[in-house]
Amino acid sequence: MLSLMEIQPHFVVNVTPEDYEMLANADAGDPKAQCDLALLLFSEGHLEPAYSWLTLSANQFYPDAMCYLGRKHISGNGASRDEDAGLTMLSHASAKGHFVAERLLWFLQSPKGKELRAMQDAKALDDALDIVERKAIVGVLNAPGSLD
């Protein structure tokens, strides 16, 4: 068996020793680690492998992965544009209690969300989803007792 140190020069992303456990866990099928690896790959522009890892995680019903994948399908940013698949993923994540997915769904079903979806302007839609996501996260962080 090869050690991570032996194969590190072949990685497509900058991996630190702190990432080794995540890589091993992702390879072993852990959905959280798979999602984390996908986000690392997306952040460095490696869309195809990132999408593959995110899909593996989402197929195990990991809520964060389902939310990210749903968002990517809706906007077409990092995945093929497939609104039905995106809404389905967001619905599954929301049903598992993912607050951001719930807020994204609410927005997408609002008049403004429907208008943006009908315009087929992926950039404008993605920008609007960014705002909704930020507001949801800040709202949770600012809620009384959230950081206790």
Image (cartoon, grey):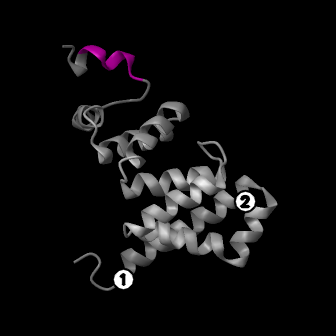
- The tag earlier along the polypeptide, 2 or 1, is 2
- Is 86 situated left or right of 18 in this image? right
Quarter of the rendering occupied by the C terminus: bottom left
Quarter of the rendering occupied by the N terminus: top left
- Is 29 situated left or right of 65 in this image? left
- Is 22 situated left or right of 47 in this image? left
In this view of the protein, can residue 27 be seen by the observer? yes
- Is 139 situated left or right of 25 in this image? right
> Residue 75's x, y, as percent?
65, 53
* Residue type beneath disc 1: Ala
> Residue 80's x, y, as percent?
64, 42
Q: Which residues are magenta?
A: 6-11
* Labelled pair 2, 1 in contact (Cβ < 8 Å): no
User: Residue drawn at (65%, 50%), measured in percent from left and top?
Assistant: 82
* Residue type beneath disc 2: Ala
The residue beneath circle 2 is: 124
Identify the image quadrant of residue 74: bottom right
User: Residue drawn at (40%, 40%), measured in percent from left and top?
Assistant: 56
Q: Of residues 60 and 43, which is closer to you in this image?
A: 60
Q: Of residues 15 and 25, which is closer to you in this image?
A: 25
How crowded is the residue under tag 2: few (<14 C-alpha within 10 Å), some, or many (20+)?
some
The residue beneath circle 1 is: 143
User: Residue drawn at (41%, 46%), measured in percent from left and top?
Assistant: 59
> Residue 15's x, y, as percent?
33, 30
Give the residue furthest to the bottom: 144
| Label 2: which secondary element | helix
How crowded is the residue under tag 1: few (<14 C-alpha within 10 Å), some, or many (20+)?
few
How far is mark 2 from mark 1, CA to CA?
A: 29 Å
